[in-house]
Amino acid sequence: MFQLFSFERSTDAASDPAAYSTRVSSAAAAAAPKGGVFSRDKHACLFAVRGEGSYTPVLGLDTSVNEKSAQLMGQAFGTRSRRLDELPAEVRQSRGFAQLVLNSQALVGSTQAGADPAEVARVLSTSMPPGCWVGVSFRAPTSNETKWHMRWLQHRHDAAAPTHNSIRQGVVAASFYAGGPTTQDACEALGLLASSMPGFDLDVRARPVPKVARGTVRSFLLAGVLAALWMLGVPFPDALYDSLKEAAEIDVQDQVALVWSYLWVPVVGFAAGGLRGVLASPVARLKRSLRTTGALPAPAQRKGKPAAPQRERWEQRGFDRETGSPRQPRHIKERPGGYPLADDVFKFGASTFTSMANPHGSSLVSSAGVAERAATPELLEADGLIIGEAAGEPVPIPSRAMRFGTMVFGRPGSGKTSLLQGLWGFLCQERVQPSGHPDRPGEQSALIAFETKGKGAAGYLGWAEYYGDRCALITARDPDSIAIDPFYINAPLRERALHAVDCFVYAYDEGAVGDRSREALRAVYTAAFCFMDHQIIDQVWAGSPEGKRLFTHPDVSVHDYAHALLAGLGEEPFQDLMATLGAYTKYSSRELSAAEHEDALAAQDAMGVIASKSAAARATYCEAPRNKVDDLRSMGFYFTSARRQASWHQVLNGKRSVVVNTGSVEGFRRMAESQTQLLTRMLVFSLHAAIMEVCTNWEDTGESVSIFADELAMLQGSSPDILVSWRAQGRTYGVRTFFATQEPELLLAKLLKSVMTYATVGSFIQPAIDQAEVVSKQLNSEVSPQDLAALNKYELALRTQVEDRPQPTVVVAVKDFDAIAGLR
């Protein structure tokens, strides 16, 4: 059986006739390669099948031909190929068949230059009735065919060097067939094809495929005549006996009778030849070939050498010997010579007929999405994680490219989270089983994933378990899990308060934290950190007993102190805390260390801006910053002092693997989206601060921290500078980023511009054209917004680098990473 492939419409239809002609000629040469010394020539077939509401192009390849030839043909059309199990039912159920044969050697005008590559398919799909099909069987021409055809062509065009589409590289010898419910339908379909093919300049006709082979009738007639002579015993002429006897000087009657008695031998021979002509007729061969191999018969070769063409001329006959005068010239008539091929075989460039199978010529062809794009050899050979296949070849994201950022776009459910988690698994494996390959992180790497939707955390943990890597899960809503404190930095009190204020500024939208709020927050957090760090109320309390009870419960946090210092509990608790702070300052000067006394002075000094105001003015002044602090107090489940605390410094120094889940999880109260966004942004800000402190020169020491997030928009705060800096200066700190997002327009302009410069940028399906336009501009001119909108599920338009050299965009069918790790 032949290998069968079909082609589907895509968004990348071939439109340049010259480029199309070159590509399709190469594809045809690959599909029907010329044989060698010990191998036969291969032939291939193209079908265009018109069904009820469908138009199906089919390519048939010999089983010994590489299936990449089908991919080449698909690329010539600007689409992709897919395998078929069998020929369409319309071909298998045909009852009438026709073939194209030479009618005369007359020249028929037909131009190919500039022809629309899809026009033939457009004509056929519109005019060919349902149930009909046309097909072409093609092979490489033999050397004799090429020689004879050139001689014939030179005579036909009256030129020593004729211009014709049959003398370029990649020409083929082709036979044309058609089928349908009736022979008449098949003849009409084939006539339609012949009249619509560009550059087909031969006078041809469609005829029914013969039901008997050539010479069959002659064989039966000769067998009948000889049988009659043998059975009736026609007398042998006496005169012939006498002449034979005289010439041979022997009695030949006995010999003649002997020969006559064996006349049945040629009778049987001719009869057998006639019978073979019926059983092995062209139509029988065609049906058998379609049934057993799924292909059309190979184009026949001419039997015998064709008569040479001859031009009209007068030939000089020399001189008369007697008179010495020239003899009368002899007139030589023009002879076109014999047709150089079999009368049902034609030699043309492949672009003459392949356009009948161009899927872009008919809206009845199913859509495949985006045209197949093969990866470069450099990309295929690069070291990295194999993420899927393009044109049948495994495609990696190179390890070196991973050092300089990976950004993935795509709608929900398109595959971006699965791909990101597959990359996470790749790094988990490196931590457990270091490969030692250049540019891979090895075991000296920290892994951090921000999960903001809740459900994705299981994927990261599943990959860690798959490779035996230890990974900690931090769930914001789960009081039993560890909490990363976003306000922790290893610095003096005033700097910690400034860090807290900056954390607020980053976490809220631009302008939400004004100058007055910054001033107030800096004051209250300086004092709140002092109260918490030194457990002041356990040493000194200058307020009422009822006021003290507000701060002695085990869940009290630094934000509760900040809230009270912003008069959030009323004027009396505020005054109690200020009195206690004053008493503690005096106490620390006498009883405690200089550092503790310095913190007390700093806290008392910072609170002066609030304490100096009247109660009414204080209430107005503190309202805006108090609202911000209340947002954190609403997440008391996370910020409670009773919960186990950790810091980014510990994660980085210990090269830990952690998944921070700030989304809602089953079994706990729902996490509001505003809470998820606020907490996530604060954690990102504090992570950046820790990286700047801990990871200095990690690039030189071979250490790294890889940061994952499948919704980057949740990480950006009022300013994109932090996330942008991870691209600009992150390499020095060993930062590797792996981000994804659904809607590119949700990213701040500066951040979007930054992620588009990542070494690896990919996009799954983007159904909204405006979103697709944003991404397609960064994927080279080869990918249009329509391409991104037409991608199939789990298909990725990928632009990456090999050794810092950008590669052409390739469309990758991403493998099922979830299934590999047993996540579903």
Image (cartoon, helix red, strand yellow):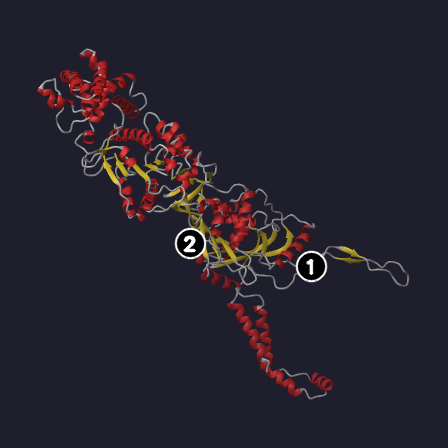
Q: Which mark is residue 40?
A: none
- In the image, 590 versus 519, the foreground residue is 590
Q: Which mark is residue 84?
A: 2
Q: Residues within 10 Å of mark 1 (few under 14, many from 20)?
A: some
Under mark 2, the amino acid is Leu
- In the image, 670 versus 258, the foreground residue is 670
Question: Label 1 belongs to which residue?
Answer: 308
Image spot of residue 186 (x, y percent): 50, 55
Image spot of residue 695 (x, y percent): 34, 33
Q: Residue furthest right?
A: 323
- In the image, 298 versus 48, the foreground residue is 298
- Which quadrant of the figure has residue 534? top left
Q: CA distance from mark 2 to mark 1?
A: 45 Å
Helix or strand or loop: what does disc 1 sit on? loop
Q: Residue furthest left?
A: 545
Proximity of marks 2 and 1: CB atoms separated by less than 8 Å: no
Q: Inspect this view and state whether residue 791 appears.
A: no
Image spot of residue 648 (x, y percent): 28, 33
Instruction: Report the side of 639 relative to 794 (left or right).
Output: left
* Mark in front: 2 vs 1: 2
Under mark 1, the amino acid is Ala
Q: Inspect this view and state whether residue 180 appears.
A: yes
Helix or strand or loop: what does disc 2 sit on? strand
Image vertical order of residue 563 relative to residue 784, above or below: above
Numbered disc total = 2
- In the image, 644 versus 344, the foreground residue is 644
Image vertical order of residue 592 relative to residue 173, above or below: above
Q: Residues within 10 Å of mark 2 (few under 14, many from 20)?
A: some
Q: Earlier in the sequence, mark 2 or mark 1?
A: 2
